Image: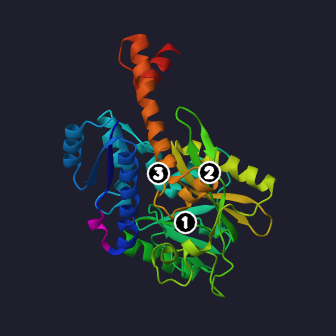
Amino acid sequence: MRIAIIYNDPTHAGAHEAAEFGVLDEVEPIVDCFAGAGHETSLFAVREAGALCQHLKSVQPDVVFNCCEAFRGDARLESNVAALVELLGIACTGSPALALGLALDKHLAKIVFEGHGIRTPAHVVATPENGCHGWQHLQFPLIVKPVAEDASIGIDDGAVVDGAAAMFERVRRVWREHAQAALVEEFIDGREFNVSLLARPGGNFDVLPIGEIRFDSLPRGRRRVLDYDAKWNPAATFRQTDVALCPARLDLVSAARMARLAIDAATALGARDYARVELRQREDDGEFFVIEVNPNPDLSDGCEFLRSARAAGIGNDATIQRIAACAAARIHSTDDYHERNDQPVPSPARAVFRTARQR
């Protein structure tokens, strides 16, 4: 196949260059994987929408392997890249634009979770225009973070607060430094897990071995939070690479409950091909809470997702190829429809309109 690997140009990273430049550790092994398997590959850093269209028109790929986590340094535009590829009619790995947008907006994701009966921490959203309302119904401690960021951007040792004054100060900091609304949610103190999901081509998600972030080595007095420094600062005293454990030490009942929650949460948002779901288990009563869904998670060698895949006996290259095979399967399903019907595949909107008219 002809496979176009696209990724966000990290030169627009700004203050968060460690997170943005991490994409380079992801794309190079992907190129090597497909080239080694005999596929024709191209690598393209997305800087301009028009340039991306020209590149895809030039190389005419069968599949786009989408590693874009932002556009011009803005994670809120990540879904637009996937939408553009969709509009061009090219099969694209990972989640569609709607799922990417829902997952990034933590408030919208929580509304979807609650609508599906999926337990997630109680929360409110604070905006510069409307302020912070309803927080009195939340139980301290609370955690305050940007409503639409990933990679733990905006989360540090002071993100968890114990009183109203600290909460309002943290909210104003999010407004000031991240130019967006703040999510204020109840902090679930306890164990932190990540459940990686890998689909079969044309099929459902498989649950890979569950990982855990161990907080045993956290300096005394610090909250059990995996903050930005822990993920991206090699000099940090508490680093994710040092404290990640996979498989986690779990009883079968807890593992089964988390697996079901992870599949339900990812499915509710419309995630596709592969995803990683973050959960917490409350120390007081053992209840599990979905914190967020990460569609199209990091695929660099040391990431949680590939660590879980390797624990399942699936190597890095085999995992990457399987993700591409999921996208390729969507090509074949469309081709089969054409052969059977000799007519264009109807759009979902047209099908909904037709159904409504018949009713």
Q: Main secondary structure of the magenta part?
A: helix
Using the numbered discs, state the Cα–Cα distance from disc 2 to disc 3 in whole angstroms.
21 Å
Amino acid at circle 1: His
Using the numbered discs, state the Cα–Cα distance from disc 3 to disc 1 in whole angstroms.
33 Å
- Locate residue 233: give its quadrant: bottom left
Q: Is residue 270 magenta?
A: no
Residue stretch rendered in magenta on the structure: 10-14
Badge 1: residue crowd in 10 Å (few <14, some 14–19, many ≥20): few
Badge 3: residue crowd in 10 Å (few <14, some 14–19, many ≥20): many
User: What is the number of the mark on residue 313?
Assistant: 2
Q: Is residue 13 magenta?
A: yes
Using the numbered discs, state the Cα–Cα distance from disc 2 to disc 1 in whole angstroms.
48 Å
What secondary structure is found at the residue carrying circle 3? loop
Looking at the image, the residue that sits furthest to the top is 341
Position above or below: 186 against 156: above
Q: Position of residue 309 (x, y in %)?
A: 58, 53
Position above or below: 116 against 153: above
Q: Position of residue 261 (x, y in %)?
A: 68, 49
Q: Earlier in the sequence, mark 3 or mark 1?
A: 1
To which residue does mark 1 refer? 133
Q: Earlier in the sequence, mark 2 or mark 3?
A: 3
Camera-side mark, 2 or 1 = 2
**In percent of the image, x 43 and y 50: which residue is there?**
101
The scheme the figure's colours follow is rainbow
To which residue does mark 3 refer? 296
Camera-side mark, 2 or 3 = 2
